[in-house]
Amino acid sequence: MLDHPLNSLGFAKPPSATRVVVAMSGGVDSSVVAAELAAEGYDVVGVTLQLYDHGAALAKKGACCAGRDIHDARRVAETMGFPHYVLDYENTFREAVIDEFADAYLAGATPVPCIRCNERVKFKDLLQTAKDLDADCMATGHYIQRKMGAAGPELHCAADAARDQSYFLFSTTREQLDYLRFPLGHLASKAETRALAARHGLPVADKPDSQDICFVPNGNYAAVIEKLRPGAADPGEIVDLAGNVLGAHRGVIHYTIGQRRGLGIGGLGDPLFVVRLDPERRQVIVGPREALSTRIVPVREINWLGDAPLTLQAEWQVMAKVRSTRAPREAVIRPISDTEAEVELIAPEDGVSPGQACVFHAPGDSRILGGGWIWRGR
């Protein structure tokens, strides 16, 4: 075995002697990963997580992990002839993801539960399950690349910038990177993925992409939080930066930093935006667009993926991304500890919100240097 050339997953043995657990959501991406690896001769085991009550989920469209998706993942496994298991992770998912999501919104933050799900469920508990199954690695359908560097495996953006999911995977640790594989990261477009699905005759080849957070039907965050935390939508005041009352709102959870529409305070001159949320006082604070501009971003829970320790230097020049929909911008990281830092944006950004991630990109490179959580505004 030691003299055997490396297979496509980087192991010095034939595919048939390499077991890989594929995290299958029931969508086209993870289905193609499983099908491609099975076709190459790998010992594939498909695993789908049941994350929440599927009685309600069965009638819901546009989300990953609903009851329909479990059925689709099973059909793909049957088509390609490999075993498939469904694991009940409802309690874990509620405790690790849903509860924090609700509490973060109640605290006036704008959380990103998909990152927490990857960090605390898929790349933790599911990854351990893969090891318990004696798998050599775990593969997912995420659009991101794992490349070998001088100091070990590195995380890189996907080849297709339109599909890149690096923002949602910044908290992937070095130890996890050793074990994970992302077979779709090098593809040039989603069309290639669907073509591969069609080539394998997969029943999900034309399945639409998921759009919503899986436990938030139709993107209605407030309705979910009200159900989880009764009384969360208590009304309060909309005030300006000087504390003047401009109107009333129907609950802080209905508003996000940077929001302009739906405030119900039109006709006051220049447009006003939500610049801060104060849950304790039940106040939505609004102001002009310039009040949204931020240059200093405090970040904590940092996962650093650079070759040298974060605290080795007083400053690091990076490209920082403060929202999934924003392009990375020039920034400087000033470490406070191994897990906390102040990030200075060279040009100010609007709508930087606590609860969002700040992801670090290497300047002029596709490499992800890690990231952290924005924890309070200034």
Image: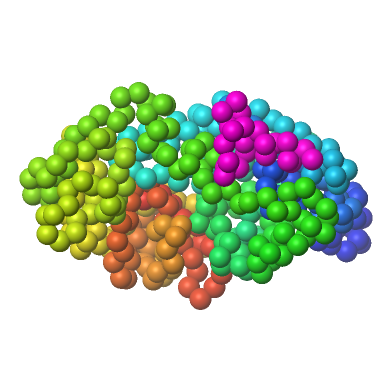
Residue 250 location (% of width, % of height):
25, 35
* Residue situated in front as seen by the camera: 182 or 48: 48
What residue is at 63 percent from the left and 51 percent from the top? 208
> The N terminus lies in which quarter of the figure?
bottom right
Above or below: residue 119 compared with residue 156: above
Q: Quadrant of residue 319?
A: bottom left
Residue found 49% across the figure and 65% down from its top: 361
Q: Which residues are magenta?
A: 54-75
Residue farthest bottom in this picture: 364
The colour scheme used here is rainbow
**Residue 307 visible in the picture:** no
User: Is residue 359 among the parts visible in the rendering?
Assistant: yes
Pick the front one: 152 or 263:
263
- In this rendered view, identify the residue nearer to me: 231 or 276: 231
Q: Position of residue 130 (x, y in %)?
A: 73, 39
Give above or below for 189 relative to 38.
below
Q: Is residue 58 magenta?
A: yes
Residue 227 magenta-drawn? no
Q: Tell me which corner region of the image, top left, top right, bottom left or bottom right, holds residue 225.
A: top left
At 74% from the left and 53% from the top, the residue drawn is 205
All told, the count of numbered labels is 0
Residue 173 pos. (x, y %): 57, 50
Q: Which residue is pictured at 62% across the width and 32% down the height?
A: 58
Is 363 displayed left or right of 272 in the figure?
right
> Relative to 290, is 355 on the left or the right?
right
Left or right: where 229 falls relative to 208:
left
Query: Could you say where residue 85 lies in the image, as x and y percent from the top left?
Result: 76, 33
